[in-house]
Image: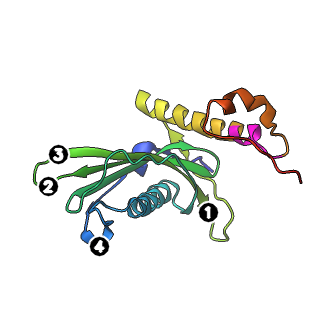
Amino acid sequence: MSVKVKTSKESSVTITELMLPSNSNFSGKIHGGYILNLMDQIAFACSSKYSGKYCVTASINTVDFLNPVEVGELLTLKARVNYVGRTSMTVGIRVTSENIHTGEIKHCNSSYFLMVAKNEDGSNAEVPKLKLTSKEGVRRFIRSLDRLNMKKQRKQNFHKDEFSYEQYQEEIKKHNVIIDLEEN
């Protein structure tokens, strides 16, 4: 059986949607939760397109809302697979908004969704190998790998059974906090 290989470009998905008043908050800006919902949808479409399988969201890496999205703007989300493991994929998503009157385009958000492919019985499914075809693709792959490694290291460093706040006392003093532990 031959190993299936795909490029990041083969996973590429773009959606554009007009932002309506029904998705806005009291100040006329589009709810961040609505934008997150669209991001989750495009991450699903992108990872499913790449893997040929049903995919679920395992985690979302940093979501920074850089610019507000106004009612009446066109919101465009672009997604592609940046990294693959055995059964998981990191989907990079870029969100921009366009003022349809002025043509001004704003970068609103970039985020990374970790998606896992599933078989029909719900078990994890293997995904195709990722063929990197550009220096930018290699950079995105290594950046995603680094992000995953940092997440694993952070879990180890702050595991509740291993953590000792004493080693952070000098750092804690720099912040707006007082430690007053209750005796258990």
Q: Which quadrant would residue 45 be assigned to in this image?
A: bottom left
Assign the C terminus to one quadrant of the image: bottom right
Give, as a three-letter code, the residue at label 2. Answer: Ile
How many residues crowd mark 1 within 10 Å: few (<14), some (14–19), many (20+)?
many
Q: Earlier in the sequence, mark 4 or mark 3?
A: 4
Q: Earlier in the sequence, mark 2 or mark 4?
A: 4
> Looking at the image, can residue 33 be seen?
yes
Give, as a three-letter code, the residue at label 4. Answer: Ser
Q: How is the image coloured?
A: rainbow
Kindly report which numbered mark, 1 or 3, lies closer to the viewer in this rendering. Answer: 3
Q: Earlier in the sequence, mark 1 or mark 3?
A: 3
**Which percent across, then down, holds residue 132?**
47, 35
Q: Which quadrant would residue 66 be assigned to in this image?
A: top left
Q: CA distance from mark 1 to mark 3?
A: 40 Å
Q: Which residue is mark 3?
A: 104
**Which percent across, then down, holds residue 154?**
69, 39
Q: CA distance from mark 2 to mark 1?
A: 39 Å
Q: Which residue is mark 4?
A: 22
Q: Earlier in the sequence, mark 1 or mark 4?
A: 4
> Which residue corresponds to the image point at 59% horizontal and 48% vertical from the top-left?
2
Magenta extent: 154-160
How many residues crowd mark 4 within 10 Å: few (<14), some (14–19), many (20+)?
few
> Which residue corresponds to the image point at 67% horizontal and 29% vertical from the top-left?
171
Kindly report which numbered mark, 2 or 1, lies closer to the viewer in this rendering. Answer: 2
